[in-house]
């Protein structure tokens, strides 16, 4: 099963992707996490990606598609995966579609987690991420058991460089211009499913479970 998570930055794609992956035993493929791991590791890819990410811009399609294909060609992705943060542009969606077609399959669901812009800015200010495993927390809405420490691995929780207010606003602008058109793209493919992302995370997941069956 191939599941695509759509939604604005901060809508809760990653939070829900973690739950889907745990519940349905699928790998969680986050292009943002792959870029951040490369930044941390000081790779060339990381250096290039960082220059875009720090400005709240998208990393160029060619580079992003290349790393995505590389990741999903690994063995753990053989029976499906959850895409979190990819595709983000029409050319990326077309590249994904062509790749899946070559394998004789197509994406099963594109789940759009809907949250208005006003809520987003508030959410992003409180987001904390585990420096070690990437798990997602929020200072009010998804607190770890011990402040600043990851429940899952004991890693340190940090504020992402691109979660500053001005960068968040630019990311939202980029979302509306380049990523939102994917909603119509997947509507056209007949696989778009919409969920109300302003609800409590448990309720959002319940709605997603009802979609996935
Ligand atoms: P969010 O959790 O806010 O949706 P991500 O972790 O998915 O953010 O992405 C962080 C940043 O990484 C993006 O703002 C963008 O610069 C870059 N990025 C991630 N995925 C993509 C993609 N599919 N195409 C282009 N850039 C991407
Ligand atoms: P995305 O991957 O779409 O950028 P995240 O899953 O990282 O979004 O969520 C952004 C922030 O909002 C995180 O701090 C997360 O803990 C919090 N969050 C996620 N879902 C909800 C929700 N339904 N209600 C309140 N806060 C949420
Ligand atoms: Zn962790």
Image (cartoon, grey):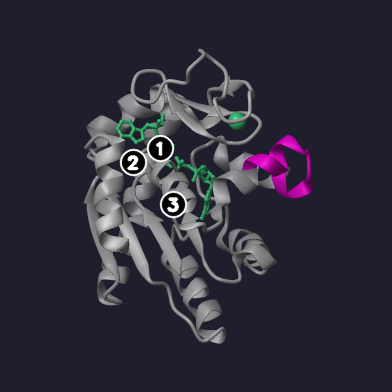
Q: Look at the numbered disc 2 and say if its residue's Cβ is closer than 8 Å to ligand 2.
A: yes
Residue 197 visible from this viewpoint: no
Local SS, label 2: loop
Real-space Cα separation, disc 1 to disc 3, in angstroms:
33 Å
Give the extent of the magenta segment: 36-46
Which numbered disc flags the more N-terminal residue, 1 or 3? Answer: 3
Mark 1 vs 3: CB contact within 8 A: no
Which percent across, then down, holds residue 117? Answer: 26, 37
Q: Is residue 127 left or right of residue 141?
A: right
Q: Write down the residue under mark 2.
A: 11
Residue at image x 51%, y 31%? 162
Q: Write down the residue under mark 1.
A: 170
Mark 2 vs 3: CB contact within 8 A: no
Local SS, label 1: helix
Mark 2 vs 1: CB contact within 8 A: no
Residue at image x 57%, y 18%? 149
Quick check: 155 above or below 146? below
Q: Quadrant of the N terminus?
A: bottom left
Q: Write down the residue under mark 3.
A: 23
């Amino acid at each position: 099963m191939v599941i695509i998570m759509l939604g604005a930055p901060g809508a809760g794609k990653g939070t829900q992707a973690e739950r889907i992956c745990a519940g349905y035993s699928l790998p969680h493929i986050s292009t943002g996490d792959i870029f951040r791991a490369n930044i941390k590791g000081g790779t060339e890819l990381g250096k290039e990606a960082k220059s875009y990410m720090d400005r709240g811009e998208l990393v160029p399609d060619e580079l992003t598609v290349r790393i995505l294909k590389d990741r999903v060609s690994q063995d753990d992705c053989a029976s499906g995966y959850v895409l979190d943060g990819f595709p983000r542009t029409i050319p990326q969606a077309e590249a994904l579609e062509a790749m899946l077609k070559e394998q004789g399959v197509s994406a099963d669901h594109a789940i759009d987690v809907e949250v208005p812009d006003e809520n987003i800015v508030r959410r992003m200010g409180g987001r904390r991420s585990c420096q070690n495993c990437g798990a997602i927390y929020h200072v009010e809405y998804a607190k770890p058991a011990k402040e600043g420490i990851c429940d899952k691995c004991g890693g340190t929780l940090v504020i992402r460089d691109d979660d500053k207010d001005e960068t968040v606003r630019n990311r939202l602008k980029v979302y509306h211009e380049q990523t939102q058109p994917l909603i119509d793209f997947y509507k056209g493919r007949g696989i778009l499913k919409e969920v109300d992302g302003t609800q409590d995370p448990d309720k959002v997941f319940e709605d997603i479970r009802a979609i996935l069956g």
